[in-house]
Amino acid sequence: MSDRKEAYLDYAAATPLDPRVIAAMKPYLDGCFGNPSSLHTAGRTAKTAIDDARDVISGILNCRSSEIVFTSGGTEADNLAVLGVARKNKNRFNHIITTTIEHHAILNSVEQLVKNEGFSADYVKVNREGIVDPADIIAKLTDKTILVSVMYANNEIGTIQPIASIGKAIAQWKKENGRRPDEAPYFHTDACQAAGALNLDVKALGVDLLTLNGSKICGPKGAGVLYVATGLKLEPIIFGGGQEWRLRSGTENTPAIVGLAKALEISVAEKEKENVRLAALRDKVIAGMTKIPKSFLNGHATQRLPNNANVTILDIEGEAMILYLDELGFCVSTGSACTSANLEPSHVIRALGLPYEAAHGSLRITLGRFTTEEEIDAFLAALPPIVEKLRKLSPVRLDMKNFV
Amino acid sequence: MSTPDVVSKDQKNNWLYSAEVKDHFFNPRNFMVDDDGYVADGVGMVGSPACGDMMTVWIKVDPQTERITDMKWRTFGCGSAIASTSMHSVMVVENGGRTLDEALAIRPQHIIVRLGGLPDRKIHCSVLSDKALRQAVNDYFRRAGKKDRMVAENSRVIDKVLKITDHDIEEAVLEGADTLEKVQAKTKVGTGDPSCIPEVEQLIRFYKEKYFN
């Protein structure tokens, strides 16, 4: 197993830092270390950097700077959105709507509210291609619903949800039910995976809350954003010095915040060109992988992120494929149970109505800024012999007709 | 997607598993290349693709010496499932082959020692080949008309798909798994046959009371 061709094809898990982001962060890692809450020059310099970052991000989101809350990442922003809105309004409202394919940062926050805090939740199903129907969301709304949370694009299968349509439908429901636009139910979207590729204008999307993070867009880990529409009250989940409009205490992570803003700025500027380039590479990956007998695409063929391919290869198991690929230098991911902490296969692939077998054999290939066509070609050449070898070892002979 | 939380036993080595596991995973021994022309004296099967692990074991037995002269296998599963089946087959046929009784005495722990260890949470779910071999040996006795020799399970099968016994659940509880979730994390019980879960919960209560109250 020599002849390694290093190719990192797991951008949905983490992305390398763009050198321009590193350059922007560097002064705050090496030199400018002040606490943004301090009144002296060192503190004020840091404060200015954070204010500038906030302005950049609010410009991209088409919102006010005062509506940007910096967090430690996507998980914290999701937690703050769900727990913060629900707890602040628990006297009048006790119902949450989300989907079966959300990230665990949402699902486990909702579960916490249901298990321990007297809330109830509806989990709206997606269709076979992984898309939510806005009508299914509206059908679940009650006068007790405080929050609707639907992810913008899925981290496993890359499907893009009709967020703007859901936002419009919720606004319409409010009108019909005598609610002001700034009253419940509120609408949250997790845009972590979407950030590099899709429109982030919160007005156009019709969302009250939106989650972003740095580590999926060639920015640093340890920085996230929750957009919170003016007037929407949240209960903090972290208490202390009252930073971030009292919503997120703790000394700000200046270098990471600066890096996040720079990363977002770059990905928005390069989005149009990059989406075209990546979609062509993605389609090459999908075409190449589905050429393997007994394989199929998970998720929607076109309504998906330009960087995401997720293909199930039957009769073999994902972890085994990943380890063989890793040995050759290819980093990819799987929905198989064998790599998860709870030994449960991907809830997203299962939510498509597919059996466990489909999740165990799924491979996710996600591309990004530094992915080249040569890497894709090398990957597509390396995969078929691995599949052939593992199939020789496998006693399983599934019938393809049960999966299409 | 979930992040792998299995870590290398050998922290100096960046690989997930021991060098021995790696070797057997990339260079599996004794796997069944072509079963068409293969005349087995016994065949055993355990698991299902839905559970993420499934294996078939074929054996040849010398009726005079009762030694297992050949053991072939196929495994659907993760790295440790493939490596442990491969290692098990080596252990069964080495030195001219173990007798049926000797082969049945091989426990998952023995395979794991020879593999240089496995991540804890991989042990119960991926080492299934002892169960598949026990089935193959029973199949041999059935075919040979020695039904009295068929190994009576000293424990009762709870999960019919994964062939998980009450003894497996007892061991998991003894290792500290005191909830259904923790027992499932160790054994995967119920993932292929959810109907057994109420009984599993009852057994967990029983063994907790037996050992910890």
Image (cartoon, rainbow, N blue to C red):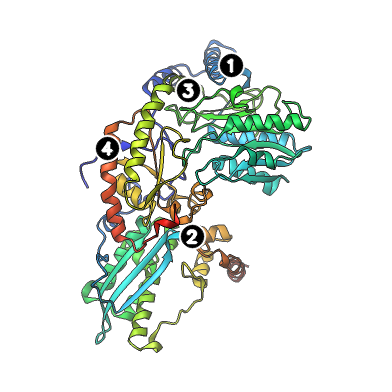
Amino acid, disc 1 = Ser
Q: Nearer the viewer, residue B188 or A392?
A: A392
Amino acid, disc 2 = Lys
Q: Nearer the viewer, residue B93 or A122?
A: A122
Chain name for mark 1: A
- Give percent across and percent down for residue B24: 28, 58
Reading the image, the residue beneath label 4 is A377
Give the Cα separation between the discs numbered 4 and 1: 53 Å
Reading the image, the residue beneath label 3 is A264
Q: Quadrant of residue B130?
A: bottom left
Q: Say which residue appears at 35% left-offset and 55% top-offset.
A: B79
- Give percent across and percent down for residue A123: 62, 45
Give the Cα separation between the discs numbered 3 and 2: 42 Å
Under circle 1, the secondary element is loop
Q: Nearer the viewer, residue B210 or A390?
A: A390
The label on residue A38 is 1
Residue A323 is left or right of residue A359, and the answer is: left
Query: Does residue A126 sit above or below A266 in this rendering?
Result: below
Q: Are marks 3 and 4 on the same chain?
A: yes
Q: Nearer the viewer, residue A303 or B64?
A: A303
- Give percent across and percent down for residue A259: 46, 22
Residue A238 in view, yes or no: no
Q: Are marks 1 and 3 on the same chain?
A: yes
Amino acid, disc 4 = Asp
Reading the image, the residue beneath label 2 is B186
Residue A318 is left or right of residue A354, and the answer is: left
Give the Cα separation between the discs numbered 1 and 3: 27 Å
Of the two numbered discs 4 and 1 on the same chain, state the one appearing first in sequence. 1
Q: Are marks 3 and 2 on the same chain?
A: no
Under circle 4, the secondary element is helix
Q: Say which residue appears at 51% left-offset and 28% top-offset.
A: A223
